[in-house]
Amino acid sequence: MKKTWILIGAVVAFVLLSLYVTQNYSIETDAAASAAETKTEAAKEPAIDFTLKDLDGKEVTLSGLKGKLVYINFWATWCKWCDKEMPALEKVYQDYKDKGLVVLSVDVGEEQGEVAKYIAEKQYHFPVILDSDKSVTYAYGIKSIPVSILVNVSGDVVYRRVGHMTEEEMRTAIDPLFP
């Protein structure tokens, strides 16, 4: 009888956990599903402004980039999916920087020295800014990383994706936003 109750409890716990995960986490893997997440004109929302320091200690303010297409990527050095995504972000940065795309790679909660070492070792060139106290991460409602957000030239969030993105998925999200 005791084993039956333990089994029933385990099944109930599994079902509740499954419901929680499916309601709170949605990591799409194909480009079509990713493109479907792009917000429509009616669903645009103003990007939350922020000022963070880059690896050299210079302040970067999102509102100062109005008029440019901005790709914001939230990540951390310890995140395996972020690490997997970074080479694609570097390629996209190199291919689109002269077209006017600004990449802001927002490190979540880590110290400058640790982040600078990681970026130097991996030989990434895109701009990195530090959200050491996670205030911007919290303001954007980010609960897991990586997260990619596209802000259009008017300063509106037009795309948001939770989870790892491939280079192709990044390009699929970015290309329609260029005139």
Image: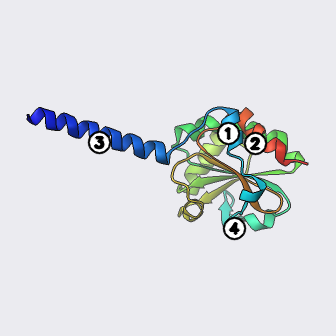
Q: Nearer the viewer, mark 1 or mark 4?
A: 1
- Amino acid type, mark 2: Ala
The residue labelled by disc 1 is 34
Q: CA distance from mark 3 to mark 1?
A: 31 Å
The residue labelled by disc 2 is 173
Judged from the image, the secondary structure of the residue bearing numbered disc 4 is loop
Judged from the image, the secondary structure of the residue bearing numbered disc 3 is helix
Mark 4 packing: few (<14 Cα in 10 Å), some, or many (20+)? Answer: few
The residue labelled by disc 3 is 13
Q: CA distance from mark 2 to mark 1?
A: 8 Å
Q: Are marks 2 and 3 in contact (CB under 8 Å)?
A: no
Q: Residue furthest right?
A: 179
Q: Residue at x 61, y 33 (%)?
A: 29
Measured from the top left, where is residue 63 in percent x and y? 76, 67
Q: Are marks 2 and 1 in contact (CB under 8 Å)?
A: yes
Give the position of the N terminus as an image quadrant.
Answer: top left
- Amino acid type, mark 3: Ala
N-term mark: 2 or 1: 1
